[in-house]
Image (tube, rainbow, N blue to C red):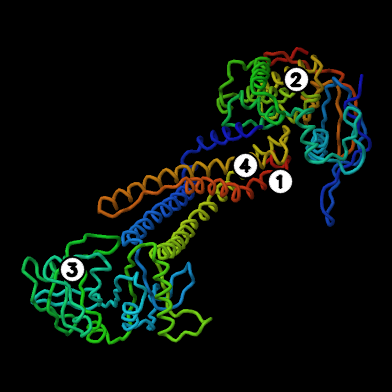
Amino acid sequence: MSKLIEVKDLKKEYGNDEVITKILHGLTFDIDKGEFVSIMGPSGSGKSTLMHILGFLDTLSEGQFLFEGRDVSKLEDDELADMRSSKIGFVFQAFNLLNRSTTLENVMLPLLYTDTPKKERVKRATDLLNQVGLGHRLDYTPNKLSGGEKQRVAIARALVNDPDIIFADEPTGNLDSKSGLQVMKILQDLNEKGHSIILVTHEKYTAEHAKRIIMLKDGLIEYDQPVEHRQIADENGTLIK
Amino acid sequence: MNIVESVSTSLQTILRTKARSFLTMLGIVIGVMSVIIVLSVGAGAQSLIINQVKSLGSNLVGVLPGNSEDDGPPASAMGIVVTTLKYSDGQAIEKNGCKCIENVAMYVTGNDTVTAGDSNITGTYTGTTANYINVEDANVEFGHFFSEDEEKTAGRVAVLGFGSKDKLFGDEDALGKRIRIGSVNFTVVGVMEERGVSGFQNQDDQLFIPITAAQKLLLGIDYVNYMRMKVDTALNVEQAIDSVKDILRDRHNIATGEADDFSVRSTAQGLDALTSITDALKFFLVAIASLALVVGGFGIMNIMLATVQERTQEIGLRKAIGAKSNQITFQFLIESVVITFLGGAIGIILGALISVIVAKFAQSLGYSWDLVISLNSILLGAGVSIGIGLIFGIIPARRASKLNAIEALRYE
C-alpha cells in the first residue's frame, strides 16, 4: 500500500522568546492510504495539535512531514489552504455548520473555494446528502436537525471535495450513544469504500471502531498497534460485535 | 467564489438581518441624500441668480470700485466699502466716453425708516441718476422719473416702486404727497410700473431718489457704490469697456503699469464671476454634506467589526475547509460595499425626490428655478458610497482574514 502520511521526529512548540511550551516531543509514524486510525490520548497529550498539523491547519516546528511523498513541512498559508481545500475533509465535535444556511448550502460550502460550477456543486452535495440518509432534508436549516443529523451533514460536507483523508475530531462527543454509533457506522462504511480516516478521541471505546490506535501521552507515542477487538456498528445504532 | 455569488450571498446575509442592516446604512442614506439635494438645490439656486443677471441684457457694462482678478469678484461685491468711484467719474464717462455708451446710471443704496402720514416702513432706498429708467428699461406708471436737474441739485423728490407705494399709501394717490426718509422730507413725483419678482429681490419694493440727495442729505458720502451703463449693441461692449478704463485711469491718475482701482465688467463677465462664487458655495455645502458620509462610514466599520466578532466560528470553519485569507477579506469587503451601495442607491432616490419637491415648490412661487439632477451627481453618489464601503470595510475584513483558524473554530 502506498504511503499517505509519513512523519519523522515531528516536534511542535508554541510561545515567544520568554515562554516556550513544548507540545509534541518527536513523533514518528506512517499512515497508508485506506487506513482507519484513531489518535487517542488524554487531554493535554497533544492529539489535537497533531491533528491540526496533519490537517494543514498548523505547521510543525521541527521534523519532517511528507504527504503523498511530498514534503509539506514548510508550506505558506495559501498553500496550506489549497491542501485543506483539495486533500482534507474535517468533521468537528461541535458540527460547525452555518445555522442560517440550508443543509444543501452547508454541504456545498467547501466547493465555493474550488471553482466548481454551481450545477456540479448542487449535484455532488445532493448525492452525498442522499448517501448519509438526509436526502429529504436538503432545505432544512441545521437548527431543525437532531445532533446525529447535524453530524451526518458535516460528514457529507467533509466528503464533498472528494478528499484523500477525513479527520474526525471527537465526532461523537456531542451525541447520544445511538446517534454516535450511527455516525461511526458511516465512517466505517466510508473506510470500507477506500476512504482514509483519522479519528481523534479520548475514549478507548470510540477509538476501537478504527483498525489501528496511535496512543499519545505527554507529546510522545505511548503505543501504536492494531485494534484487536474492533467495535462494529450498524445503521440502527447498535453494536454488532 | 465569483463576484456575482459573493454579492448574492451578501444580499442574503443583509436580508436576514433587515433592521440592523437598515440602521447600518442609514448614515450613508442620509449622507448621499444630502449631497444629491445640495447639488441639485445648489444648481437650481445658481440658475435662479444667473437667469436674473441674464434678464438684464447682454449689452450692459458695470463699474465697481476696487481692483479684481478677471474671473473673481471685486472686494466691493463682497460688501467691503471702497470709496474711489465718484459721481464726477460717471459724468465724465457720459461726456467724454465712447459714443457707443448710450446711458450711464450710478447708484448708492441705504436703509432707513420711510414715513408717509401714519404709515412707516423700514426700507431700502436707491440714490440713482435720471438715466436709471433708460439703463434698466424701467417704466413710470404715474407721474414722471426725476429729471437731470433734480439729480444734479439734490432735489428732494422721490419715485416709488409699485409695492412701496402700496405699502405707504394704499389705494390713495401718492403723487405730490410728502414722505420722510429718516428725517428728510421728499415729494413723490412718480410711481413705477409693476415689475414682479425677479430673482431674490422684489423690484417693486424699491424707492428712488436723486443720487446727490442720497449722498449729501442721507448718507453723508461722496462716492458711488457702482455704475451701470447701456451700450448701443452687444458688439461694442469691449470698446465701451476700454473707453471707461481709459477715462477712469486718467481721472484717478493711475500711472502706466499700475493696476486699476476699479473693475469694469460686462454682463457676460459678471456671469462668469457669479458662477465661480456660486460654484464655490455649492462645493462648500457639498463638503459639509459629505461629513455625514464619513460619519456613516464609521457606523459601517463599527457594525462590520461586530459582525466579524459574531461570525468568528464561521470564519474559522471557512478557513478549515480551504478558504484563503484574501477570499475571506473579499467576502467581508463585498458585504460592506453591498451595504453602502444599497444605502447610496436609497439616498440617491430620496435626494432626487426631495429635489423635485423643492423645485416644484420654488416654481409654484414664481421663481425661474431649474430642476437639475445631473448624471454626474448620481454617479458621484454611487461612487462615493461604494468607496466608503471599501475604505471603512477594509479594516474589519482584514481582521476577519487574519483570524487564526484553530482559535476561531473553538470560539464560542
Residue A221 visible, this orientation: no
Judging from the image, mark 3 belongs to the subunit labelled B
Mark in front: 4 vs 1: 4
Q: Which residue is mark 2?
A: A187
Q: Which residue is mark 1?
A: B402
Residue B270: give its label: none
For badge 1, the amino acid type reads Lys
B25 or B264: which is nearer to us? B264
Residue B332: give its label: 4
Q: Please tell me if label 4 and label 1 are on a single chain.
A: yes
Q: Secondary structure at mark 4?
A: helix
Residue B128 placement: quadrant: bottom left
Residue B137, given in percent of the width and then of the height, sits at 25, 64
Q: Secondary structure at mark 1?
A: helix
The residue lying furthest to the front in this view is B99
Q: Which residue is mark 3?
A: B161
Residue B41, given in percent of the width and then of the height, sits at 38, 54
For badge 4, the amino acid type reads Phe
For badge 3, the amino acid type reads Gly
Per the model, the C-alpha gap separating discs 4 and 3 is: 66 Å
Per the model, the C-alpha gap separating discs 3 and 2 is: 99 Å
- Is B176 on the left-hand or right-hand side of B296? left
For badge 2, the amino acid type reads Leu
Quadrant of the snapshot with the C terminus of chain B: top right
Quadrant of the snapshot with the N terminus of chain B: top right
Q: Secondary structure at mark 2?
A: helix
